Image (cartoon, rainbow, N blue to C red):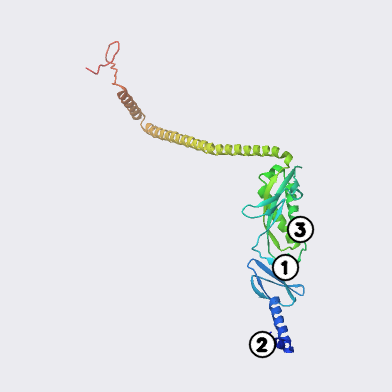
Amino acid sequence: MSEKSKSFFKKLIRPSGIITIIIIILAISLVASSAFVVDESEQAVITRFGAYNKTLGPGLHIKMPFGIDKKYIVDGNKVVKTEQFGFRTSSSGVTNLYQNGITSESTMLTGDLNIVDVEWIIQYRITDPKAWLFSVEERTNTIRDISRSAINTLVGDRAILEIMGNERTNIENLAVDSMNEQFKKLNMGINVVAVRLQNIVPPAGVQEAFEDVNKAIQDMNRFINEGKESYNSEIPKAQGEADREIQVAEGYASERVNKAKGDVARFNSVYEEYRKAPAVTRERLYLETMEQVFNQQAKDKKPTLIDDSLENILPIKNLAQ
């Protein structure tokens, strides 16, 4: 050992050197127990002497050292957490591998007393870190129990064909509302954003029969849609034809009514003239009638006149002469 090293160790052994070392260690401990960083997707709950103090967002923060303040890192409200029921994801990657057939969670009794296997997931966010940490001790088990209770209730109120068919989306929406209501009562500080029913299948022994029923229902819906399509194409066409016939009839009626009114008006005017001069009116009517007769004959063929002064068997005047 060199003389310089011996001199350095002698200085450390002195009381002043020991105090310096202690100060350095205390400074390092102070910094290590005071400063911390919260990630962008996280929040930090700070307790002081075991009681809640405040909640901090992302960034660099300082707290009281030496265990006076303690931090608890919680996922932020932008992080969506997932719970699976009836199956588990055993490995994730390019191709996910699942463990199916957890019947203790998926097997349920329907409203029409059938057995059905339902697999689903729930997605939720932590909205209140303080409530999430301190309100309920068994948080995961509570979430799973409430979720199973909600889905079992909704499935138990419906027939199996409705659950496998048109009630699927309705069950998901009602489950979200029911779970959020229960979590709010427990003050768990979470909000369920989605419930997704994955597989809904009958037990293996009757699965083929239910598949046949499902195909029949699909065929029935297809025939109904085809019938509605035909109805929607024929009814407007028939309605259009009916409207056209009504318009033609209304036009004909208006024409006849107007013609009748015109005839009445003409008759009334002639009658008024007749009352003033009956002889003249009769002569005028006779001449007008004869004019119409001759005009009609001229259109059809050459006119034939009868001469009452001739004494032939047929007193017809030959106009050609």
Q: Where is residue 247 in the image (x, y as percent from the top left)?
A: 47, 37
**Residue 160 sits in which quadrant?**
top right
Label 3 residue SS:
helix
Residue 110 in the image, given as x and y percentages of width and height = 74, 45
Q: Residue at x 67, y 37 (%)?
A: 212
- As drawn, the residue found furthest toward the left would be 321
Q: Mark 3 points at which residue?
A: 141
Q: Front-most of 18 and 97?
A: 18
| Secondary element type, mark 1 | helix
Camera-side residue: 68 or 252? Answer: 68
261 lies above or below 40: above
Q: Which of marks 3 and 1 is nearer the N terminus?
A: 1
Q: Which residue is denoted by mark 2 in the rendering?
A: 4
Quarter of the image for residue 300 reads top left
Q: Where residue 269 sits in the image (x, y, percent)?
A: 39, 35
Marks 1 and 2 sit apart, C-alpha to C-alpha, by 57 Å
Q: Which residue lies furthest to the front in this view?
A: 1
User: Mark 2 is on which residue type?
Assistant: Lys
Q: Name the residue under label 1.
A: 130
In the picture, the disc for residue 196 is none
Residues tagged 3 and 2 counted as in contact (Cβ below 8 A): no
- Secondary structure under tag 2 reads helix
Q: Which corner quadrant holds the N terminus? A: bottom right
